[in-house]
Image (tube, grey):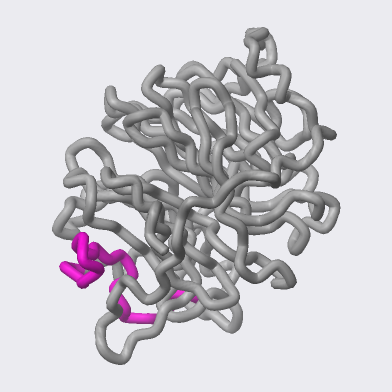
């Protein structure tokens, strides 16, 4: 991040659109929605001897139907530190493993992006400074780019991380725009004063600018946990700690704030501008948002209308439950990556009983 760091006054260009009727933090829960999807567990076949760990990373390949998943090496706490397992995995449309890679680069995979050339980007949201009983060289807190076959191509941020502008500290997610620009959402903590911002880089990884800071006002963040982009080029940020989605242009100017998709850990927008939003914490991690049902809400990224809800089948679950990461393939099948309590990835198929 060699260029001068700057914070944008994102709320300066707030646009008054019809969708702002939804922009109320105290709006009633959007729960009474149909669920036309059937849940399929065990669709993805892990290699012999391996079990699913926590996962929040799932994306669709450029073929539109193969699925990329990064799981935390059968665990969640120390995850992939001192673990030779390849945690980044490609599964074909039938759920069979095609290839895997990533060992020795990633400590705690949290966000994933498949760019328009099929390259795989991973946001590594923890570092060895946060791991139990670790001794050795500091690493983690970076964003890594791999070729589709697993060749390491680029890293953003410095190994081991840090809290100033030369580093990331807990980068949550990464997104590559159609022009190759790279966006990174940083900040996995709600603690006041913690790094909470979005960075923009050019296609070569040169830092351009950053926007946002910790807070609860317009354009501020408490955990910019996931990123997505619609067909208009608008950047959607799942501002999880504030129970909302904030929408920006690619220069960091705030366009809108939506609350109707609930407290989102993961978001995905498909080529038809269908928005998939995964709430894994309402009523469990965040009891104050307990009137909202956890689950995956499906609606329009253009109008903001919410159409469906796939509810958490474990309403009494404690902690992070049901899907945290979410994606849909070209057939409309939804895939939800779960941190706990079971882990793994479920498949949701429309119209199947």
Image location (x, y in percent) of residue 289: 80, 50
Q: Is residue 229 above or below residue 225?
A: above
Work out which residue is located at the far bottom of the displayed protein and give it: 49
Residue 4 lies in the magenta stretch = no
How far across and down, in percent of the image, does residue 146 sit? Answer: 24, 52
Q: Quadrant of residue 206?
A: top left
Give the quadrant of the C terminus: bottom left
Residue sitting at x 50%, y 32%:
199
Point out residue 23 in the picture as x, y percentages from the top left corner. Answer: 73, 24
* Residue 295 appears in view: yes
- Seen in the picture, residue 36 relative to 137 is either above or below; the reply is above
Residue 222 picture location, percent across and down: 70, 42
Residue located at (45% from left, 25% from top)? 3
Quadrant of the drawing holding the N terminus: top left
In the figure, residue 69 lies in which quadrant?
Answer: bottom left
- The stretch in magenta equals 79-99
Residue drawn at 37 percent across, 47 percent down: 328
Is residue 166 visible in the rendered structure shown here? no
Give the main secondary structure, helix, strand or loop, of the magenta stretch.
loop
Left or right side of 210 for 263:
right
Quadrant of the image occupied by residue 28: top right
Count of numbered circles in the view? 0
Residue at x 69% of width, y 17% of height: 20
């Amino acid at each position: 991040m060699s260029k001068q760091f700057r914070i944008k006054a994102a709320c300066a260009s707030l646009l008054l659109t019809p969708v702002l009727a939804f922009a109320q933090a105290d709006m009633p829960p959007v729960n009474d929605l149909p669920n036309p999807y059937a849940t399929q567990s065990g669709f993805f076949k892990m290699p012999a001897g391996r079990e699913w760990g926590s996962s929040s990373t799932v994306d669709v390949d450029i073929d539109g139907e193969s699925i990329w998943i990064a799981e935390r090496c059968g665990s969640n706490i120390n995850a992939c530190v001192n673990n030779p397992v390849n945690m980044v995995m490609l599964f074909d449309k039938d759920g069979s493993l095609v290839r895997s890679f990533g060992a020795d680069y990633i400590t705690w995979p949290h966000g994933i992006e498949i760019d328009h050339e099929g390259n795989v980007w991973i946001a590594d949201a923890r570092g060895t400074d946060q791991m139990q009983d670790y001794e050795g060289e500091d690493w983690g807190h970076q964003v890594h780019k791999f070729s589709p076959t697993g060749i390491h191509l680029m890293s953003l941020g410095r190994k081991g991380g840090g809290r100033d502008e030369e580093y990331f500290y807990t980068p949550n997610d990464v997104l590559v725009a159609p022009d190759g620009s790279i966006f990174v959402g940083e900040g996995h903590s709600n603690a006041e004063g913690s790094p909470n911002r979005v960075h923009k880089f050019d296609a070569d990884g040169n830092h351009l600018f950053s926007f946002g800071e910790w807070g609860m006002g317009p354009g501020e963040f408490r955990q910019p946990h996931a990123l997505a982009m619609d067909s208009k080029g608008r950047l959607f940020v799942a501002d999880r700690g504030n129970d909302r989605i904030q929408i920006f242009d690619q220069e960091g100017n705030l366009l809108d704030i939506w609350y109707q998709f609930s407290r989102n850990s993961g978001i995905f927008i498909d080529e038809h501008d269908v928005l998939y939003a995964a709430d894994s914490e309402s009523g469990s991690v965040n009891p104050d948002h307990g009137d909202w049902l956890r689950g995956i809400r499906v609606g329009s990224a253009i109008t903001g209308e919410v159409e469906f809800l796939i509810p958490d089948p474990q309403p009494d679950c404690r902690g992070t439950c049901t899907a945290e990461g979410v994606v849909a393939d070209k057939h409309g099948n939804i895939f939800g990556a779960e941190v706990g309590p079971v882990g793994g990835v479920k498949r949701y198929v429309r119209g199947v009983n």
